Amino acid sequence: MDDTKTMQASDHAHYLHPFTDHKALGERGVRVMVRGEGIYLWDSEGKKILDGMSGLWCVNLGYGRHSISKAVFEQMETLPFYNSFFNTTNVPAVKLAEKLARIAPPGFEHVFFTGSGSEANDTNVRMVRRYWDLKGQPQRHTIISRFNAYHGSTMAGASLGGMEGMHAQGGLPIPGIVHIRQPNYLEAGRGMSEDEFGIEAASWLEEKILDVGPEKVAAFIGEPIQGAGGVVIPPSTYWPEIQRICDKYGILIIADEVITGFGRTGQMFASELFGIKPDLITFAKGVTSGYIPLGGVLVGERVAEVLIGQGGEFAHGFTYSGHPVACAAALESIRILEEEKIVQRVREDTGPYLAQRFATLSDHPLVGYANSCGFVAGLNLVRRKGPTIHGHEYFDPKLEVGMVCRGYMFNNGMIMRAVGDRMIIAPPLIMTRGQIDEMVALIRRCLDDTYADLKQRGWM
Ligand code: PMP
């Protein structure tokens, strides 16, 4: 019987969850999600929940898109799988590669498919090193990333990422990957304007390049907006300066657009918004709206010329590279994105509306700073507000106030993620103005509940 208690017991008995303390979850009891429609989910107790995180930054088109399930079903009936290794290909993979070349920024004519974002970033590590080998500069081996970045959970993905907790387990990072500080204005921009800080934060890259030795640096990797790190939106001066520095030293740029790709910021790719001209673009999640796993790397002409022109065999690939069913799901997802003009709507209508509505939360006594870009947003919980954003008083991190707030969100039927004491959302791109109002009202109510609770505990 699939009742909640039985599911919870079986879950605890057998299912090890990602990034989870298994024992603690068993004591708390897991929530069982059973159904989704549009921007809403229902759990096994029949509770309706507004999904402010699009699953995990991926269900951009919302739940219950029958045309995607139909495309998947039909492809499964026709050809559920064939590999792309031995001089073979399949129709959806070819069509998707061509489609991606058409919607990618100029200069991206090729794609390498993987099963996930992590695998795509592993592919990047191997591909940039292969590129420099072929260029006769095998000493160009080092990849520079940023602390608090998230690039996946495989050995290379977690090494590229800058999450302390991940590096502490399993002997990471692997050799040849180094990190610089993130462009977090709130954390490190005191005494500077945002624009000044953007230039300052980019200069940390040049320092690191000179420290490593420019002749040894292969690539710089960054998320245009750091997602899992807490929706860190960089100042507008940051990326153009990063671009200038990479160009100066001939270093490749990898834009990890696993979250930002396929419309999240109101552009098809955020590189276009931030003025980045990457050589490689990592994608996953939104490409299929999360309905079927798929990831990959868009390969720009600089790398493609060498890899294809003089490369011979690139000894890399996955069983599920170019999986026909995943590619069919992606083709239908992109078709919907275009036909319903969803990216344009986020850019011109619902994105600005979300920005305006979300910013109103700043007047709440718990909220010190609220900002957004397209359909990602975050707010910082503060103990006491200061006269400027750098003057706030924060909670002791050990109190885990973000988790208290997340608990109220969850109980009130709203999914909002906590990264420390920063509360973040990345809602489905199909959200209407009315639903944005509903979401912001729900968030305010949960903030009120959190505030009352913290007062009662004597924490503020
Ligand atoms: N890069 C970024 C920017 C991500 O946000 C994620 C996942 N959250 C990944 C890579 C890894 O993707 P996956 O979980 O599909 O391996």
Image: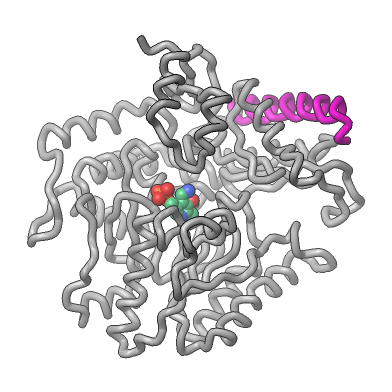
| Residue lying at 70% horizontally and 40% vertically, measured from the top left | 356
Image height of 122 relative to 52, above or below: below
Quadrant, the N terminus: top left
Say above or below: 16 vs 8: below
Residue 110: percent from left, percent from top: 27, 65
Q: Residue 287 at x, y = what percent?
A: 36, 46
In the rendered image, the quadrant that contains the C terminus is top right
Q: Quadrant of residue 448?
A: top right
The answer to whether residue 90 is above or below residue 404 is below
Q: Is 130 on the left-hand or right-hand side of 254?
A: left
* Camera-nearest residue between 319 and 261: 319
Work out whether residue 224 can be spotted.
Answer: no
Q: Is residue 439 magenta?
A: yes
Q: Is residue 272 left or right of residue 137?
A: right
Q: Which residues are magenta?
A: 435-460
Q: Is residue 197 magenta?
A: no
